[in-house]
Amino acid sequence: MRLAQAQLESHLKNGLQALYVLAGDEPLAQRECLDAIRAAARAQGFEERTSLTVERSFNWQQLQNYGQSISLFASRRLLELSIPSGKPGVDGGKALVALAAKTIPDTTVVIILPTLERDAKNSTWFNALETQAQTITLNEVDAANLPKWIANRLAQQGQHTGTQTLEFLAHQVEGNLLAANQEVQKLGLLYPQGELSDETVREAVLNVSRYDAFQLGEAVLQGDAERTVRILQGLQDEGENAVAVMNPLMWVLRPLVRIKQAEMRGENINNAMTSARIYGDRQALVKRALSRLSLRQLEAALQKLADIDRTAKGVMLGDAWLEISRLCFGLARVRSR
C-alpha cells in the first residue's frame, strides 16, 4: 500500500499503523518522515522508541527477541529498523517476511531502506512488506522542479519571491534538498513574512560561514587531505554539530556508490551520473573520486557513517567528531590506483 510523502501527516492523524516502509536515498525526506512518525507516536501515547541498524554482523534474532519481550514502562512502542545496504540477506529476508505476516503487538515498526535495485524490489521479502505496510517512497526532486519545491517551502513560512530568484537558489544548492531546506529556513529566520527581493535573498545565501559541510565533502572527493583537515578543524571551531556534518557527507557519498555499481556493470558512466543528479563541473570531480575509491571503500564509508550517527545519538560509545575526522582524512588520502 503506497502513500505519498505529502499525505503522511494527514494519514498519521488517524492513528499509526503497525508497519511502515521508508524507501529512498533522499536524506531530508527520510528525516522529515521519521520526525512526523515520531511526533505522531508521542501524541498517541507511545512511550518507548528503539532503533536497530542492520550491519554485517547483525543478529536477526534480535528482532524476534524484541517481538517476544514485554515493555515494563510503555504500553505502546516504536521500533525503527534501518537497513542501509538494502540487502537483509537470507536470514533477514525470512525475518522480514515473518514480520509482515505477523506484526508485533502494541508496536509500530518503521523499516528504513535505501533506493532498491531491481532484484531487491522483486524479492519475496520486499513484496511481503509492500503488501502489508504503508510504503513511502522518498523521492528526490529533479532540477527542473526544484525552484517550485523551494517556492512551496517558502510559502509554508509565509514568504515568496520571483522566478529568477528561485532559480538562483536552486542553482546554489546544486539539487541538494538538505542545503535548499537550510537556506529556506535561514530566510525565515532573517526576514519577516511577505515578498523577498532578489538582492535580499542573494545577500543571505552568499553570506555563509567560513566553512560548511559541503566544502568538506568536496575536499574529500578531490583527495585534498590538507584542505580536508583544515575544514574539519574549522567546523569544530565554529561549534558545528557532528550530525549536521555527517548528513551532507552521506549525500555526497551515496550517489558515488550507485555510479560505481553502474560502472562495474559496464553501463555508461555519464548516464549514471546524470541519473544520480551529478551535473556540470561536478561530473569531473566525481570521476576523479571514482578513479581513487573502490566500491568496497565507498560502501564501508557509508556503513561507518551509519555507525557515527548512532554514536552521535548516544546509541554507541565513542567520539562522533573523532570518527568523522578519521573517515574523511582516510578517504582523502586514498591515491589513484
Image (cartoon, helix red, strand yellow):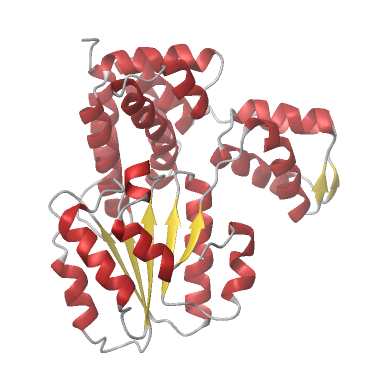
Residue 28 percent across, percent down from the top left: 52, 48
Q: Quadrant of residue 144?
A: top right
How many callouts does the rendering have? 0
Q: Nearer the viewer, residue 140 or 303?
A: 140
Q: Is residue 51 above or below residue 158?
A: below
Residue 133 percent across, percent down from the top left: 43, 68
Q: Residue at x 16, y 64 (%)?
A: 60
Q: Is residue 203 above or below residue 98?
A: above
Q: Where does the C terminus fall, quadrant-wise?
A: top left
Q: Is residue 99 above or below residue 260?
A: below
Whether residue 117 is visible: no
Q: Nearer the viewer, residue 71 or 134?
A: 134
Q: Quadrant of residue 91?
A: bottom left
Residue 39 percent across, percent down from the top left: 52, 71
Q: Quadrant of residue 267?
A: top left
Left or right: 280 in relation to 235:
right
Whether residue 153 is visible: yes
Q: Residue at x 48, y 54 (%)?
A: 31
Q: Residue at x 59, y 80 (%)?
A: 14
Q: Residue at x 73, y 27 (%)?
A: 168
Residue 275 percent across, percent down from the top left: 50, 28
Left or right: 254 in relation to 35:
left
